[in-house]
């Protein structure tokens, strides 16, 4: 009877230690994952939804990696005209394109080509000699107050 009791004691001790170790691992894993989920890149933390009824979005980046075709499309989805003068686009490498004097009316869109060219509406030209956008990169649109207004992750 004594050996069975001793075996039962070791089994119960093993169960308790295993449960404690498992709970500790889950606790710290959950805590680390929650911290990852709560961490917001500084640029995204500056978004102020609904501020001044600004509703602008980056619809996409077309022709990624091909200088002659590469462009980013931006649309005013709001109900008011947006003065994009001094707004700027930025990539992950801090390469920026600053908008010239331009008003984007509700429902209107503009395309910013990476290559050189002559600005017309709705086509603007960055004047770069090489493609800017790469897959996985984050395109960000900032207003003249340095407030992030739109983001797009290049597929």
Image: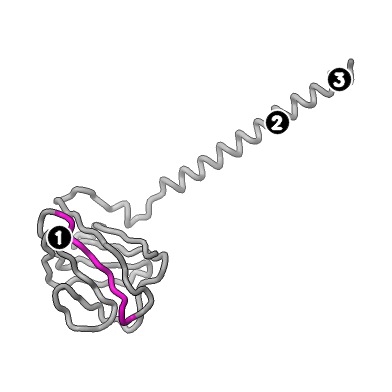
Task: Name the N-terminal-most of marks 2 and 3.
Answer: 3
* Alpha carbon separation for disc pair 3 and 1: 79 Å
Magenta stretch, residue numbers: 67-78
Residue 37, horizontal then vertical, whole percent? 43, 46
Is residue 52 or residue 105 the one in the foreground?
Answer: 105
Q: Quadrant of residue 82?
A: bottom left
Q: Is residue 75 magenta?
A: yes
Q: Is residue 64 magenta?
A: no
Residue furthest to the top: 1
Residue 42, horizontal then vertical, whole percent? 35, 55
Task: Name the N-terminal-most of marks 1 and 2.
Answer: 2
Disc 3 marks which residue? 4
* Alpha carbon separation for disc pair 2 and 3: 20 Å
Disc 2 marks which residue? 17
Check the image and report above or below for 49 versus 13.
below
Q: Are marks 1 and 2 in contact (CB under 8 Å)?
A: no
Check the image and report above or below for 139 versus 44.
below
**Residue 107 circle label:** 1
In this rendering, position of residue 132 left or right of residue 97: right
Q: Nearer the viewer, mark 1 or mark 2?
A: 1
């Amino acid at each position: 009877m004594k050996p069975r009791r001793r075996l039962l004691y070791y089994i119960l001790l093993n169960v308790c230690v295993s449960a404690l170790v498992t709970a500790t691992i889950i606790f710290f894993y959950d805590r680390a994952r929650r911290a990852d989920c709560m961490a917001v890149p500084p640029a995204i933390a500056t978004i102020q939804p609904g501020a001044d009824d600004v509703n602008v979005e980056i619809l996409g980046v077309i022709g990624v990696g091909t200088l002659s075709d590469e462009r980013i499309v931006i649309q005013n989805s709001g109900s008011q005209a947006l003065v994009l003068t001094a707004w700027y686009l930025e990539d992950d490498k801090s390469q920026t394109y600053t908008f010239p004097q331009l008003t984007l009316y509700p429902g209107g869109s503009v395309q910013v080509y990476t290559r050189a060219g002559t600005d017309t509406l709705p086509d603007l030209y960055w004047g770069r000699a090489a493609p800017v956008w790469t897959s996985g990169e984050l395109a960000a649109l900032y207003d003249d107050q340095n407030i992030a207004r739109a983001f797009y992750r290049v597929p």
